[in-house]
Amino acid sequence: MNNKIKTLAKGIALISGCALTSVAIANTATIQPAGQICVTCHGVEGEGIEPLGPRLAGLSKEYITTQLQHFQAGVRQNATMMPMAMTLQGDGIEQVASYFSAKSPKTEVKPVIRGEQVTFSDDTARLAYQGDWSRGLPACVTCHGPSGLGGGLFPRLAGQQASYIKTQLLAWQAGTRKGDVDGMMANVANKLTAAEVDALANYFANLK
């Protein structure tokens, strides 16, 4: 490659880099300045950056708003998110929640309606769709919707990072995450074995 071609290649790379940066800035323009730091861990499109931040795309505005309020109030404990949430004053929470809830997950998941399948050979799938009533465990989809797609105050599990789902189940068990109605999630999480926590996290993370 001669010097002219090398120079041209460098120029194209520089222009491309500037263009991508401009797109990223434009995409975050709807978030107030204090909220633009969110993309550092959660990505411009809300797809998450493991292990820094979980996926927010696909979560409802109601859910994101509630969780940010929980971080601000100390109801939900996280050394990184608590101070970050405190920077969102005025209508900051609403703007951030509106921005990320409008993003669509890149991975499409075909909804499996509860009852379409009566028997399950896979123990994890059975737990997700039928629960284990001998232990008072409801099916995950009872609250999180078909295929864990979520809705309202119940977050989307389908396609979420397995490491994040596991971390949250452990947080419910340890009592470092609260704010659920009537202690519902804490009650469910504390009935799960370590193996079931791992299995459910991986099951929902890999749903297609």
Image (spheres, rainbow, N blue to C red):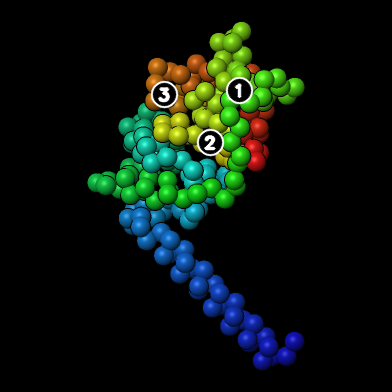
Q: Position of residue 161 (x, y in %)?
A: 59, 40
Residue 71 visible (yes or no): no
Residue 21 in the image: above or below residue 94: below
Residue at 36% over, 47% down: 98
Residue 119 visible (yes or no): yes
Residue at 73% over, 90% down: 2
Identity of the amino acid at label 1? Gly
Residue at 64% over, 38% down: 207
Q: Nearer the viewer, mark 1 or mark 3?
A: 1
In terms of secondary structure, where does tag 1 sit? loop
Q: CA distance from mark 1 to mark 3?
A: 26 Å
Residue hosting label 1: 115
Q: CA distance from mark 3 to mark 2?
A: 18 Å
Residue at 70% over, 19% down: 119
Identity of the amino acid at label 2? Leu
Q: Nearer the viewer, mark 2 or mark 1?
A: 1
Q: Position of residue 106 (x, y in %)?
A: 57, 50
Identity of the amino acid at label 3? Asp
Residue hosting label 3: 180
**Which sits earlier in the primary sequence, circle 1 or circle 3?**
1
Residue extending farthest to the front is 116
| Mark 1 closeness class: few <14, some 14–19, many ≥20 residues within 10 Å | few
Left or right, 13 with respect to 144, comes to right
Q: Position of residue 41 (x, y in %)?
A: 49, 50
**Which sits earlier in the primary sequence, circle 3 or circle 2?**
2
Left or right, 90 with respect to 207, comes to left
In front here: 71 or 156?
A: 156
